[in-house]
Amino acid sequence: MIQLIRGFRDILPSDVPLWQRIEQTAVELFEAYGFAEIRIPIMEKTELFARSIGETTDIVEKEMYTFADRQGAKQKADELLTLRPEATASIVRAYIQHKMYAGDPLHKFYMTGPMFRRERPQKGRYRQFYQIDAEIFGTGSAYADVLLISMLTELLRRLGVDDTKAHLNSLGCPECRPAYRETLTAYIDARADRLCEDCQRRKTRNPLRVLDCKVTACREAMTQAPELIDHLCDACRDHFAIVTESLADLSVPYVLDKRLVRGLDYYTRTTFEIHTEVLGAQSAVAGGGRYDGLVEALGGPSIPASGFAIGFDRLAEIVAQKQPAAVPAPALFIAPIGEEARARAFPWFIELGQAGVTCDIEMGGKSLKAQMKRANRIGAAHVLIVGETELVQGAAILRDMNTKAQQAVPLERLVATLVAELG
Ligand code: ATP
Ligand code: MG
């Protein structure tokens, strides 16, 4: 038997109601704040991710699903394509490509869909996983960052998770980061022999990433490292102060997390992760921040932006522990007995569905006993029984599965009666 690909997953019908509830809750909340859905392709040119996410990140270095797309005789080289490992790069590309910055550059987007990273599969970590993203283009305001963090907190609260904490840091800007980078590099160079292989490589190309390394030896070597937050320029410090003060005003729980640097190169200023105890201390359910340099880096005008990505799989796992979703049950199960009754009842079933009554019917020739068993199993609220006798008497029997009460429903106007009663 052919099994699914390692690190991939099926989301079975018993889990889907939960996923739908999460998505609907997010959509409702985001749209209230003027976010509009954008749908972007699942594949892009590899170069887009390499340039935006950064050549020295884990994603680009080792996690992307990339392949050469065979080109026609005219083109010389095959084109490298990549299954998207995250959404921001594509959304920025679309924003630039469709010149959405013309006129009013302010746009708020959200999207949801699968992402692909060839990571080591483990609990809660997949190679195809899902994200819910939101991005705000066209404003550098600290309040945009606050809106994003507050939306995340509220989304989780609406889903029954009320112990969230936003971990916050500021990554500075091109004004203040270079000087800090030098200070940090000097610190790292003095301890280089204690660092893991990855950090040996990172330390010259992307020293900030060393702060973020999960290897114990690296963590220990970095305990006394200079903190970015103490090296911000005045403008970045003021910006960050608005974020923390406004979050406090709104009673959004947060903590400063000076080691939070995020894996992606394009982040500037505010960076954050949302944590909850449900998953344990180590893992974040969402992450994001400001990326003021990315639109320009990808060939657009200089336009600031900010956004987040929620790990949908992790969110679903958290919410399932807090409030498991019930699989929806139909309002009606139609139980015809005999060929003639089935032929009569089938159009009722089609019409009831068209009228919005959730219903099901026995399509084979099962006995009434077997049909009642099935109605029970799927949790139908009512069963409509119709056999030869009912056809002769001109009325079917509607049984309330809760109270066991039964009533006769005349076959004329049967659909209208049931729509009125159950719809
Ligand atoms: P992590 O530190 O957990 O690897 P990350 O920094 O790589 O996270 P982001 O790129 O910011 O994660 O993605 C945002 C969210 O997507 C994460 O907080 C996490 O919940 C989720 N996520 C990331 N990678 C995976 C994966 N392989 N499987 C499931 N969820 C994931
Ligand atoms: Mg990761």
Image (cartoon, rainbow, N blue to C red):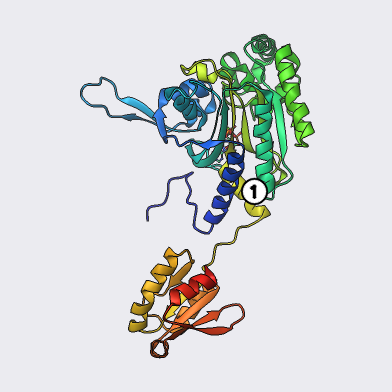
Q: Is residue 309 visible?
A: yes
Foreground residue, 165 or 413?
Answer: 413
The answer to whether residue 198 is left or right of residue 281 is left
Q: Is residue 223 visible?
A: no
Quadrant of the image containing the N terminus:
bottom left
Percent position of residue 58, x then y: 53, 27
Percent position of residue 164, x then y: 72, 41
Percent position of residue 185, x then y: 66, 12
Q: Residue furthest left?
A: 73
Foreground residue, 384 or 180?
Answer: 384
Question: Residue 369, relative to residue 353: is it above or below?
Answer: below
The answer to whether residue 81 is left or right of residue 322 is left
Residue at left 56%, top 47%? 23
Q: Quadrant of residue 366?
A: bottom left
Q: How many marks?
A: 1
Amino acid beneath label 1: Ile
Residue at left 36%, top 26%? 80
Instruction: Give the structural element (helix, strand or loop) at label 1.
Output: helix
Q: Is mark 1 within 8 Å of ligand 1?
A: no
Foreground residue, 198 or 325?
Answer: 325
Within 10 angstroms of label 1, few (less than 14), some, or many (20 or more) residues? many
Residue at left 62%, top 33%? 287
What residue is shown with label 1? 318
Residue at left 76%, top 22%? 241
Percent position of residue 209, x then y: 62, 22
Foreground residue, 113 or 351?
Answer: 351
Question: Residue 250, relative to residue 423: is it above or below?
Answer: above
